[in-house]
Image: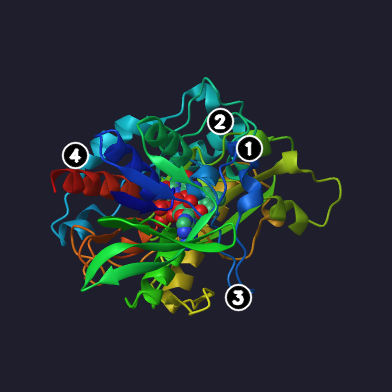
Amino acid sequence: MFIIVGTGAGGAILAKELAENNLPVTILEKGPYIKSKDAFNYYDKYNDSVDLLTTTCIGGATIVSMSNMVRALDEELHEFDIDLAEAYEYVEDLVGVHQLDDSHIGAGTQAFLDAGRELGLQTLKMPKAIREDDCIQCGKCAFGCPADAKWSGKDFVDDAVEAGATLITEAEVTELIIEDNVIKGVKFIKDGNEEELLSDYVILSAGAISSALILRRSGIDAGREIFFDPFVSVGGYLKDINFNTEVQMAGLVIGENFVLSPHFSSFIRANIPDDSVADKDILSIMVKTPDECRGYIDDGGEVYKTNTIQDIRYLAEGVATAGFILEKAGVDPNTIGSTVYRGAHPGGTAKIGEIVDSNLETEISNLFVCDASVLPISPGKPPILTILALSKRLADYLKNK
Ligand SMILES: Cc1cc2nc3c(=O)[nH]c(=O)nc-3n(C[C@H](O)[C@H](O)[C@H](O)COP(=O)(O)OP(=O)(O)OC[C@H]3O[C@@H](n4cnc5c(N)ncnc54)[C@H](O)[C@@H]3O)c2cc1C
């Protein structure tokens, strides 16, 4: 039997691929099975020193994601003999990656795209996995989708269960059972009781923080480093742009050291000392950069992160470029401000080449890690597609094995 721990980007597709090939799968998920529209209630809390966005529920962070789907780390993964070309094509088709129809590009996004092009920046519509027929253009993508129009890992868990997989929710895996360097199963807490489940194969897909902690409790020293793609939102006043109800992050500017995407933040309105300015009058841009892997997770599960000069320089470059785009798009330059610095894509805690090999297997036989933990460096771009492709590749390897 295969035990899969976690149902986010890494775990959900693995469960689906294995179950649909008639392999016995049990999925252990710490969070509850919820409706997508309720996902906002399942964001995690960290300490005061880091504002990191992750969730604990079915689908993991994919359920609050913007469904942005871009390829990343091609060259870096080649260094580990990993070629994801075929896997990318497969998963892009499976989740339906495409640029949104113009009917779903709002005025704010269009202003961003036009300004980016006028400034000579590499500007495109964001590839997404959103079904336009279902999307009601409410701007609430990061809350969980009220119309269930976005792909999320939950869709693949449903497919896996339909194909015969067993799903146990509200089951927190705490430790691994290992004998003579071979995986034998996991320990988990369900309804306050500690239980054991034995298995020939275990795949940890509990996300960069939890997977690292489970490994560490079981004797593998993961999570001594972490990256998390810092981001800020920069924006200002543009009367009646109504950007807050558009599909979020539907445009993309790719810089050498940053990516920019139109994204509404209510914190921007709070920055402007004029009570007549409302959410509908704000145009803002998310600035995201690849950071150096200089954070760590302590044994209690708290995440700490310091910023290098390079991290700050990249953010500053992105923020300045976002400012030019906003001004070109018609935003009042005297109102342009930024939110505080946050992080959304934790990874790199069990890197390929360090904690796992090119097949994502650890030093313990038949114990694999398949989630953002294994990424060797920060992609600085949305990582879901890369994690899905790595997972599909692992599913093929396990099927053959
Ligand atoms: C608001 C927001 C928007 C985002 N938008 C995008 C986007 O548009 N495109 C993109 O590519 N990326 C996006 N991301 C990032 C992306 O969602 C994550 O990078 C990705 O989901 C990570 O996948 P994962 O498998 O590593 O972990 P997760 O998706 O976090 O999944 C981990 C799973 O493990 C479960 N779990 C945790 N601990 C345990 C345990 N001990 N036992 C059992 N189960 C456990 C969790 O509940 C969860 O289901 C976004 C993130 C956020 C927060």
Is there a contact, CB below 8 Å, between mark 4 and mark 1?
Answer: no
Q: Which residue is mark 1?
A: 37
Is there a contact, CB below 8 Å, between mark 3 and mark 2?
Answer: no
Q: What amino acid type is highlighted by mark number 1?
A: Lys
Query: In the image, which disc is placed on residue 148?
Result: 2
- Circle 4 packing at 10 Å, graded few (<14), some (14-19), many (20+), is few
* First along the sequence among labels 1 and 3: 1
From mark 4 to mark 2, how far is it between C-alphas? 28 Å
Label 2 SS = loop
* Label 1 within 8 A of ligand 1 by Cβ: no
Label 3 SS = loop
Q: What amino acid type is highlighted by mark number 2?
A: Asp
* First along the sequence among labels 4 and 3: 3
Residue 17 location, x and y as percent? 29, 38
Is there a contact, CB below 8 Å, between mark 2 and mark 1?
Answer: yes
Q: Which residue is mark 4?
A: 86
* Label 2 within 8 A of ligand 1 by Cβ: no
Q: What amino acid type is highlighted by mark number 4?
A: Glu
Query: In the image, which disc is placed on residue 123?
Result: none
Is 85 placed left or right of 93 in the picture?
Answer: left
Is 37 placed left or right of 286 in the picture?
Answer: right
